[in-house]
Image: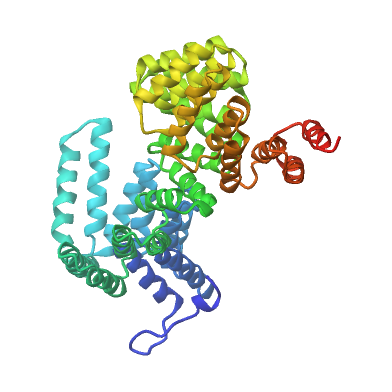
Amino acid sequence: MSEQAILPLNNTSGAILSPLEMARNAHQRYIIKQQYEDLERAIEYYVEAIKSNSTVAEPYYRLASLMFEKGEITIESAIEQCKMAVTLEPDNINAHIYAGYFLSMSEDYKSAQQEFICAIKSGLSNTARPRLFLSKLIQREMNIEGASVSRMVKYLYYLLSGSVLLLCDKSVIKMMIETISDSFSVFSYKTLGETFEKAKMYTSAFKAYSEGMSKTEHGDIFYKKMGDLSMSQQDLLSGLECYKKALKVTPDNREILLKLATLIQTSFPDKIDEAIDYYNKLLEFNIDNDKIYYELGHLYLRKDDKLNSIAAFKLALRYNEDNPYFNNSLAYAFVRAELYDDAIEYYQRAIKLNPDAKWTSIVCHALGAVYGEVKGNFDAAEATYQAGLVLDSTNYDLVLSLGDLLMVKGELDRAIRTYCDGITLDPENFMAYAKAGLALWEKDYIEESVISFHKSIELNPNFEISQNNLGVVYLDGMGTPNEALGYFINAINLNPNYTLAYFNAGRAYQALGEKTKAAEYFQMSINLNKLTNELSEDDIKSRLYELFE
C-alpha cells in the first residue's frame, strides 16, 4: 500500500481519523468479514500508529496478533511485542490478555495465568474474557496434572463469573450486534440472488449479488456467487474475472483457487502458467496433493516441459503409487522425453493394476506402439496388442494398429483378416477399408483393392491418401492412367502439399504421353519434397529426365 493510502482519512462525520483509529476500523472489518485486504490495511495502520506515537500499548499487541495470524512473526516475537505493550501500559487489560494468550500457545501456562490474573485485577468489572481464558488454562492444567477440589472450584468460579460478566462486556456485545447485522445483510442478498436463479432470472440474480457485494463488501461470498452464475451461463471470461476478484479478497480460499485452476486449465490454454501457479498454491493446503501433482504434470506436458511433467507425476505417485492413471501418465511423459525403457516400466504397472478393461486396452495400445515403433520388438508389440484385444475386443484403433504391425512383419494374409475384423467392428469407418485396400494391393488382389478403396472414399471423400492410393491401383494395377489421374488430382486438391500425389500425377501424365504436364508435376513434386522429404529426389529427377531422352 502506498504512503497516501495510510495517511489519515476523513470519516463520515468529517473528522480526521488517526492511524490508530483507521487501524481499529480495518481490524474490526477484518474480524467481521475475514478479508485479506482489511488484514493488510490494519497491519499497515498499526505500524503507522507506532511510528506516530511509540508510547501507546494498543498497536503493539494488536499488531502482534495480526502479524502472527499472517505468519510474518513467530510466537516468541508476538510474546515480546505483548510484553512491550504491558511495559508501556501496565494497567492495560487487553495487553495482559494478549500476552496471556500467546504465552498459553507457547505452553508457558504459569506465566499465562499470571497475565490473565493481572488482566482481571486491572479490568475491574470488564473481565469476562480473561476469566474465561483462565478457566480454560485451569481445565488444561487438570487434564495434564490431574483434578483437585481447589482446581475444580477455581475452574468453575472463573468459568461461571466470566460467562455472567460476558453479558456486560460492551465491546463483545457491540461486536456481536455488528456481526449479526452483517450476517443478516449477507443472508438477504444471497437469498434474493438464489431466488432469482431458481426462477431463471439470471440477470436479476447477477445484479442482486453485485449489490450484495457493494453493500456488504463480502467478496469471498458474492464474487464467488457471481462467478458460479457466469459459469452456469457459459460466460467463461466473466467467471474468470469474478473468481479472480474473490481470490484477491481471500487469497487463502482453497475452493476459489481450485475453481480458477480448473477453469484456466480447461478453457484458457494461453494461460497455462497461471493455472500452474494456482495449483502450486493449492499444494500448501496439503489436501489431495496427489491429484494436484497429477494435474500439474499434464499442464507441464502442454508446455512441453518434459522434466517438470515427469517430476510432477512422480510426486503424485509418492502419495498413491497404486494409482493406474498416475502410472500411465508418467509413462506417457517418459515417452515424450524419449525415455522409452522407463515408459515401458510404468505402462506395465498401469496394465497390471487394470482398473477398467476398456481403459487398460488403450494402455496396451500405447505400450505396443512403443515396442513396435520405437524398440523394433514386433513380437512383444503383437503380444501386447493381442492382450489389449482380450480386454476389449471392440477397440477399433487397436485392431488397426495390429493390422499395421502385421503389414510391417510382412504377414499380409493376417493383416487383411485383421483389417476385415476392423470393418466388421465399424462398417461405417473409412480407415479400415483404406488400410485393407493397401494390404490387398500388396497381395496383388487388384480388384478387391479397388473395391476397398472405393468404399473408403465413399465413406470419406476428403481422405486424400485413399484418393492417391486408388489412383496408384488404377495406374499400376489396372493400367488405366486416365482414370487414375482424376484420383491424383483429387488428392492434390484436398492436400496441396501432398508430394507423392504430384509425383503420381506426373507418372499418369507420362503414361498418357503428355510430357509437358508430366514435367510440370514432377517439378512441383521436387519443389515440395524439399520441405516434406517424402520421396527420393533422385527418383523424381530420374523420371523427369526420362521425359526428354
The percent position of residue 274, horizontal first and vertical second, equals 51, 52
- Check the image and report above or below for 301 versus 317: below
The percent position of residue 35, horizontal first and vertical second, equals 37, 62
The percent position of residue 231, horizontal first and vertical second, equals 33, 58
Q: How has the structure been colored for display?
A: rainbow
Q: In the image, what residue occupies the spot 53% across and 29% down?
A: 332
Q: In the image, what residue occupies the spot 52% across and 20% down?
A: 440
Q: In the image, what residue occupies the spot 43% across and 74% down?
A: 20
The percent position of residue 59, horizontal first and vertical second, equals 44, 66
Using residue 491 as the reference point, say whether residue 59 is left or right of it.
Answer: left
- State whether residue 323 appears in this view: no
Quarter that holds the C terminus:
top right
The image quadrant that residue 418 belongs to is: top left
The image quadrant that residue 472 belongs to is: top right
As drawn, the residue found furthest toward the bottom would be 14
- Pick the residue in front: 118 or 454: 454
- State whether residue 216 appears in this view: yes
Q: In the image, what residue occupies the spot 72% across and 39% down?
A: 513
Using residue 233 as the reference point, say whether residue 468 is left or right of it.
Answer: right
